[in-house]
Each structure stands twice: as structure tokens, then as C-alpha cells.
Amino acid sequence: MNKKGRNSSLELLRIISMFFIVIHHYAFYGTFNRINYISTNISTFRINLMLLFFGKVAVDLFVLIGAYFLSEKRFNFKRPVNLGITTIVYSLSIFIFIKIAFPQLIWNHENWFQALFPFPSPTGYWFVDSYLFMLLLMPVLNLCLESFSLKKIKQFIVLLLILWSILPTFTTLFNYKLDLSPENFGYSSGTFFLLIYIISGFLRKSVTVNNINLAKESIILSLLIIISVAYISICSYNKEFFSLTSIMAYLFNPLALFLAISIFKCFLKLKFHNKIINYISGSMFGVYLLHENSFVRPFIWKSLFNSAQYSSEAQDYLIYGIRVSLAVFVICILIDIVFRRLILLKFINKLSDIVSNSLVKIVNDEEK
């Protein structure tokens, strides 16, 4: 599907996912103390946990969407290069702006220059690192998807689910009993993205081969998971049990992954085209780079907005979170459109072409 005719249902899902990621950061980084359990604020703790859970669902969805399109494409150096350059440009620009306008927000004022080394990106982004890792392994992943039968891919997915989702969940629940750590089996946020990539590629291949109806069963499964998560949250009536339910806020949480897959299947059945949705969707990565910047993040969620004032009122805590997250979301979209897409896009694309072409030349020379 060409860019002009790209399915807007997945672009709409991308927008919704990023908005829930912003809400997740409100719940995770906000001034509401989610660590110290207080029984009188149990309703607010439950809302906080649900926001964290749906934030992880949104992360899985965001990767599923990207992987769905990537799984049918050939590897191109420009994708990871453009991702890296865009991240560096944003990170450096934000750092320079804050250093000039709000130097008090820079950590380690005396040694601030250390933020530029060893990489020219003052801020680290775990999502970018993991996504870049996935992009670099894209040729291998696509080769597996092309070569393996649907049955073999499904078996591969089950194995990786056990190693990188089920096992981390149980080892975390039981406090790494007997020194059993998921890292011993290769789990990381980067490898978890590889699992999501394989799942998304499998969905694309299975739909192409079987042309199956995905929507009905996906809606039912989504509702069952949401009801289950809500019930688990409601049942968290004391500190010990609540600490166990917090597993739902982890990236490897299988319930979040299964819900993301089910929602993704539902949106696959929706097919329409809307230029506005497609255009706004193009700024979702910029929204992430702006509001998740290590220097900007504390200012937004701890200085600018105070969620602790709503600790005792769950409904107010939720409404306030939606309001401020929507404000952050919209402002970041506008900044990305002006700063990156209208001013710097040609420069970033040109630099990406130069670097990627150089890498292609180096690889070709090595093969001779």
C-alpha cells in the first residue's frame, strides 16, 4: 500500500497508542506516590495500575503496527539511520534549548558537558534503543517469516512467549527464586520487540494466506482480558496482594501483549483513508521524543502538573490525568509539526541519505 493510500485505521491506532503512552507516563512519573501503598487511597492506586497496564498495551501496539509494515519490506539502512539521526537532532536541540533558557533543569550543572559523551545524544531513550535493535535484525526476522511455514512460525512464537513473557512474569512474581533470571534466557526490551515483530509478521502472513475473519474473536478476547485485569485490580485489597498485581505494569506482561494483539486484529479489519489522521500519525514519534526526554520529563510530570493533589479521589485523579495528558499530547504534536516536519525534515532526510548510502557502499565493498 502506497503512502497516499495507507490504511488510516492503523494510523488511528498509532495515535491512540501514543496518547495512552503519554497517560502511562503521567501515572508512572507523576507526583502521586504509587510506591508507598496507602489503604485509604486504594481506588487511586487501582486507577494508577490500570493506566500503567494500558500504557504497556499501547507500547506493544505501537511496535505491532510498525512491524506489520516492516515485515513485508526489504531492509534499508535509511530506516535505522533516520531513526538515530532524528533522535539525536531532537535530543541535542532540547538539551541546547534547556541549557540556554532553563539551565536549572540540567542535571550535574558543573559537568553538564558529560551528557554529550560518549554519544551525541544527551538523552537516552529505551524505546528507541530497542526499536533500533529490532530494525537492525529486520533482515533475519523477515527471512524467518518468508522461509518458515505458518505452523513453524507459530511454534517459534510459543517458544519465545514462554522465554520472554511467561518466564519473566513468574520469575518476577516469585522474586527470582533460585537465582532464575529471565536475562539468562535472552530477555530484554529489545528481544521482546523481536517477539512482537514475529507475531505481527505472522498475522500479516496468516491473513494473506488464509484470509481469516479476525474481528469477532478478537473483540471477545479483548473484553475478557480487560474484565480480568479490572477484576484483579479490584481484588487488590492489601499491600501484599497489590504488589503482586503490579506485574501488570511490566513490559513483558502476557495479558498486555494478548490484549494488544486482539485490539490490533480488530483494527486490521477496519479499512478507510483519512489524510488528517495519516498526517497527525506522522508526528507520533516526535511526541515520544519530546515528552519522554530525560530533562523535559521531570518538568512536565513533577513541576508543571501535580497529580499528588488528587491522591484521595480516584475519579479526579483519572480526569486530571486525561486532561493534562491530552494537553501534553497536542502541544507535542504542534511542536513536532513546526520544528521537525516543516523546518528540519529535508535536512534530516538528506543527512540520512548521505549516511545510509555510505553504509551501503561500505557493505558492498566488503562483499567484493
Image (spheres, rainbow, N blue to C red):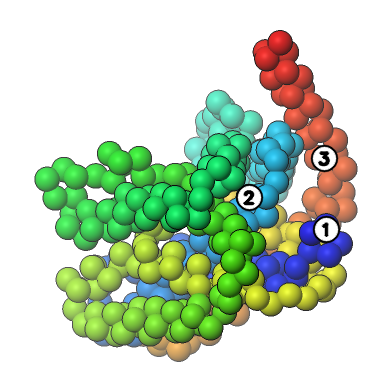
Q: Position of residue 141 (x, y in %)?
A: 55, 42
Quadrant in which residue 283 is drawn = bottom right
Question: Distance of mark 1 from mark 3, alpha carbons?
Answer: 17 Å
Q: Which residue is mark 2?
A: 71
Q: In which quadrant will I find the C terminus?
A: top right
Q: Position of residue 102 (x, y in %)?
A: 65, 49
Quadrant in which residue 37 is drawn = bottom left
Q: Secondary structure at mark 3?
A: helix
Q: Nearer the viewer, residue 117 or 59?
A: 59
Residue 349: mark:
3
Question: Distance of mark 2 from mark 3, alpha carbons?
Answer: 22 Å
Mark 1 or mark 3, which is nearer to you? 1
Q: Which residue is mark 1?
A: 3
Mark 2 or mark 3, which is nearer to you? 2
Mark 2 or mark 1, which is nearer to you? 2
How packed mark 2 is, by other alpha carbons closer than 10 Å (few <14, some 14-19, many 20 or more), is many
The residue under the point 72% across, 37% down is 76
Is residue 325 among the parts visible in the rendering? no
Residue type pointed to by label 1? Lys
Q: Earlier in the sequence, mark 2 or mark 1?
A: 1
Above or below for 181 versus 224: above
How packed mark 3 is, by other alpha carbons closer than 10 Å (few <14, some 14-19, many 20 or more), is some
Q: Earlier in the sequence, mark 1 or mark 3?
A: 1
The residue under the point 73% across, 18% down is 364
